Image (tube, rainbow, N blue to C red):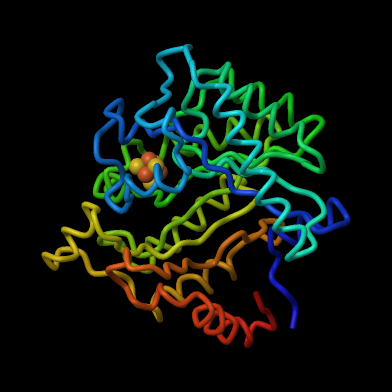
Amino acid sequence: MKQIYTFGNYLKDKFGCKVYKVGINISGFTCPNIDGTIAKGGCTFCENDSFSASTGETKELKGFHLNLTSQENPYLDKQLKQLEMQFEAISKRQHVEYGAQKFLVYFQSFTNTYAPFSTLKALYDKALSFENVIGLSIGTRSDSITEETLEYLATLNKEKEIWIEFGIQSIYDETLQKINRGHDSKNVKEWILKAKAKGLNVCGHLIFGLPDENRDMMLHTAKVAYSWGIDSVKYHPLYVVKKTALANDFTKGIFIPISESEYLDVLIESIKMKPSNVSVQRVTAGIDDNSLLSPQWCKDKNSQIKKINSALKPLGLKY
Ligand code: SF4
């Protein structure tokens, strides 16, 4: 059985050792789809509150939010310290538990290019200065990155491994409107192509099971995303968590989540269509806490992975 081309395989081939992503959450970052710049409330599936909790927000940083309109950041030193502490703790654990030898610092929560350029530069430079860090992966929205930031990342990419993770979700604008995404598909394509033209590595996030999308639409989204030249992909099922707009729609019966068998079918077809050079970073989601409303099959990731592997078996593949 051949393993599908995972991001871990890609990193091992390139760096010759175990490279792990270190997920970092910096307090003060927000999202233009939440802070009112583009919209309020965020994407309908996004539990906005969960981010501040996950950053381990300190007292001083509580209520502080960066945005693109102000160059001032009185809390930069605290953010740099937070970055260092998180990196040290997580990378140490990954080294002890999994034998990780090198690291890719992953700016994960919220929109990690949505801040004054001076702040972004300081954080990215600091992350790259840590021992055994080979690069960065930066999660963001396509409408929240500037030419200046892209140019700087391209410069860093000459010496290090720089990835940008864009939420594509769907290539259908009517779907993007239904989930209150705040940008259209043209915008995502434009910035992915710009990043690729500058030689940057791009990971695209896709969601299957978005409101009113059928199998053909989901597969078409995957096909179009591949055609934009993404280097890596994360596949997610849309699940409903409490305290979201989607939870209201689910409770009223307006939104019905994708079933596990439908998800499996679309996932396997998408993997089959995937160009061989596109690595896979994620095949599903596991929400093992009481925030999950539905579907319940998203609770148990191990059971899903078993089913995904059974479905991949006839293709001679495993995850
Ligand atoms: S772009 Fe990301 S952080 Fe912003 S509202 Fe949507 S899911 Fe939440």
Residue closer to the observer: 36 or 180: 36
Query: Which residue ends up furthest to the left in the rendered image?
Result: 252
Q: Quadrant of residue 52?
A: top left
- The residue at 74%/83% (across/down) is 1
Residue 251 percent coordinates (x, y): 15, 66
Q: Quadrant of residue 2?
A: bottom right
Query: Which residue ends up furthest to the front in the rendered image?
Result: 59
- The residue at 42%/70% (across/down) is 288
Image position of 186 (left or right of 106): left
Residue 32 percent coordinates (x, y): 35, 30
Quarter of the picture containing the C terminus is bottom right
- The residue at 57%/40% (across/down) is 107
Residue 130 percent coordinates (x, y): 76, 36
- Note whether 187 is above or below 47 in the view shown: above
Q: Quadrant of residue 201?
A: top right
Image position of 81 (left or right of 9): left
Image position of 107 (left or right of 243): right
Residue 285 percent coordinates (x, y): 47, 66
Q: Number of numbered discs present?
A: 0
- Note whether 208 is above or below 189 in the view shown: below
Ligand 1 image-quadrant field: top left
